[in-house]
Image (tube, rainbow, N blue to C red):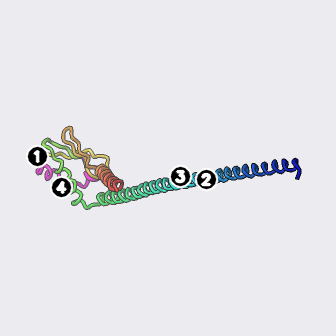
Amino acid sequence: MSGLDKILAKILADAQAKGELEIADAQRKADAFLSGDAAEAALQSENRIAEAEAEARSHISRSLSAANLQSKRLLLKERNRIIDEVLSDVKSYVCTMPDIDYFLMLKHFVLSHAQKEPGTLILNKRDLARLPDGFESSLSAKMPVPLTISGTPGEFDAGCILIFGEIEYNGTLDALISEKKDELRDLLNKQLFAE
């Protein structure tokens, strides 16, 4: 081998060694890059899964809350319908009560609101026409002061209006039913939304 061949062989061997070192370094860098990308990809994947799970839990929670609220609204609507139906039946019943029971009910209302000043009882046209004999005197006898039944009928289906000076008690059937309806609805609302 000549000197030139030795130099060329030496250059070739050095170049090959240097190339192998560069290839090994590039391979290490590529492996590090790939393993870094894999770790980063795995981290991003875990984060996305965690976010999706949190969003799903939040969506489920909102859906359950909305379903619960809708259920309460439907239940409230049904309860209110039942209250309206029952009170409508009560109104029909009171309007068709036998005279003795009906006027006993009116008497109880008047006596429970009696005041210590003269009063006036207003009845509707139908009740004035069927007023039992001695009803006015019977009421007045049980009150601290006399009570007068007005000859002018009131414009209501059943019940009465009781006036003592500046104080007026609305004992009409519609007013009493409305009052009870509000009380029942308030009670049911409190029970339903307290759960």
Queried whether the magenta region covers residue 69, the answer comes back as no
Amino acid found under the numbered disc labelled 4: Asp
Mark found first going from the N terminus, 1 or 2: 2
Residue 79's quadrant in the figure?
Answer: bottom left
Residue at figure coordinates x 28%, y 49% from the top left:
172
Q: Which of the two labelled residues, at mark 4 and mark 2, occupies the earlier sequence position?
A: 2
For label 1, the SS is loop
Location of residue 145 in the rendering, given as x and y in whole percent from the top left corner? 11, 44
Q: Depth-wise, is mark 1 or mark 2 nearer the camera?
A: 2
User: Mark 1 = which residue?
Assistant: 144
**Residue projecting furthest to the front:** 2
- Residue linked to disc 4: 133
Kind of residue at badge 3: Glu
- The part of the image, by quadrant, that contains residue 45 is bottom right
User: How far apart are the alpha carbons under marks 4 and 2?
Assistant: 98 Å
Which is more foreground, mark 4 or mark 3? 3
- Name the residue carrying label 2: 41
